[in-house]
Image (cartoon, rainbow, N blue to C red):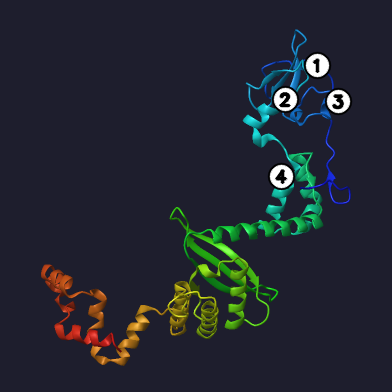
Amino acid sequence: MFQKNNNEEFEFNHQNHQKGGSQLENKDDTSSALSTLDEKDEKGSVVWKHFDRFVDNKGTSWAKCRYCRNGKYNMDSGSTGNLLCHLNKLHPNKKFSNELFRAKLVEWIATDDQPFTVVKLPEFRYVIQICNAEAQISMADTIKSNILKLYKSYHINIQNILQNTPGKISFALDIWTSPNVIGFLGITGHYIDADWNIKDILVDFVNLSGSHLGENMANMFVTCLKEKKILTKILAIAADNNVANNNTFLKSLEQTCVENHIAFHHKENHVRCIAHIMNLTVQEILKHIRVGEAQDENIILEELLEKNNKTNDIIPKLKFGLHHSPLDETIRIEPELEGFSISLNEWQTLKELCFL
């Protein structure tokens, strides 16, 4: 997939393994960091990056796996076939692959919104060198090219998934404008798969050129579905509550569906976005709420006294107790508190004050 190019990639230089055929101090020690390889071995099979070679007291050459105690093989024949089988079967993730590394590097840059030029940073390259000195890092232009290839691959995969869904697909749409004032139409699909699991997927993120009017939105949406060959699978549309735009969009979509003999009605197949409805409701409520500074309770009581002289004898009683029955029970036990009781007429006056 990738070809080494001196103009686009470089390979980190790494330290040579120690030379010589000396015997390991402990034949059962699996913690050795370096193989006792000569220069010829180092340039040979990749397995020597995962096995240590040593010679026992009888002069027999052995290879021991760096990851498990059971991986010990006689190497007198010189063949590394058994070592490679051991590595593939028991430690498949231990083998380093530059092809896999560069593919995952591209995925990380794309998903984490990293710039293509991150691969030029000396600090980044040093981190990779520490992890594996064999890693070959692609140049920024190569990264860009591979991301575009990755996008096409994902695009085809999404198309296959949506085409093979057993039922219809509902779509949710939203318009988004980037900080640099570029308009986008986000389209997500929602469906039930063959195992009756509810699934959702990002169908497309379309550059919305031109106006954000409903007719233009409909053209973009229909073009997207036709490219993926899923226009016939449309079930419902969920969108925000921009009445003018949505009505135009849905009617235009309905006309397209009628022309293609697809059942779709601009009202019956439209699902309004409940989250947007709640947002609009709260915003409207907040318009009518006036929040002032907090006032002291005594100041509030004095203002009420000035508004209605009938409260002169009631308010002090109210400050002692706010419920009729508990106060009566208290007075029965403590008769001297009778002066604080509230009559039925006074309670009625209090009710009227609540509506002032």
The residue to which callout 2 is attached is 81
Q: Classify mark 4: helix, strand or loop.
A: helix
Q: Earlier in the sequence, mark 2 or mark 4?
A: 2
| In-front residue for pair 127/220 | 220
Query: Which residue is painted at 53% across and 65% down in the image?
Result: 189
Specify the label residue 40 is tagged with.
Answer: 3
Q: Residues within 10 Å of mark 1 (few under 14, many from 20)?
A: few
Could you tell me residue 342's position as x and y percent?
17, 80
Q: Are marks 1 and 3 in contact (CB under 8 Å)?
A: no
Residue at the image position 35 percent from the left and 87 percent from the top: 303
Closer to the camera: disc 1 or disc 3? 3
Query: Which residue is nearer to you in this view: 78 or 345?
Result: 78
In the picture, residue 127 is in which quadrant? top right
Q: Amino acid at mark 2?
A: Gly
Q: Which residue is mark 4?
A: 100
Which of pointers 3 and 2 indicates the residue nearer the eye? Answer: 2
Give the alpha-carbon distance from disc 3 to disc 2, as whole Å. 17 Å
- The residue sitting at 23% across, 90% down in the picture is 310
The mark nearer the N terminus, 4 or 3, is 3
Which numbered disc, 1 or 2, marks the residue that appears first in the sequence? Answer: 1
Q: Nearer the viewer, mark 2 or mark 4?
A: 2
Image coords of residue 255 (percent x, y): 53, 81
**What's under tag 3, amino acid-wise?**
Lys
Q: Is residue 101 positioned above or below 279 on the image?
A: above
Q: Earlier in the sequence, mark 1 or mark 3?
A: 1
Distance between the alpha carbons at the discs numbered 1 and 2:
23 Å
Q: CA distance from mark 2 to mark 4?
A: 23 Å
Q: Amino acid at mark 4?
A: Leu
- Is 148 rendered above or below residue 84? below
Per the image, label 2 sits on a secondary structure element best described as helix
Q: Which residue is mark 1?
A: 22
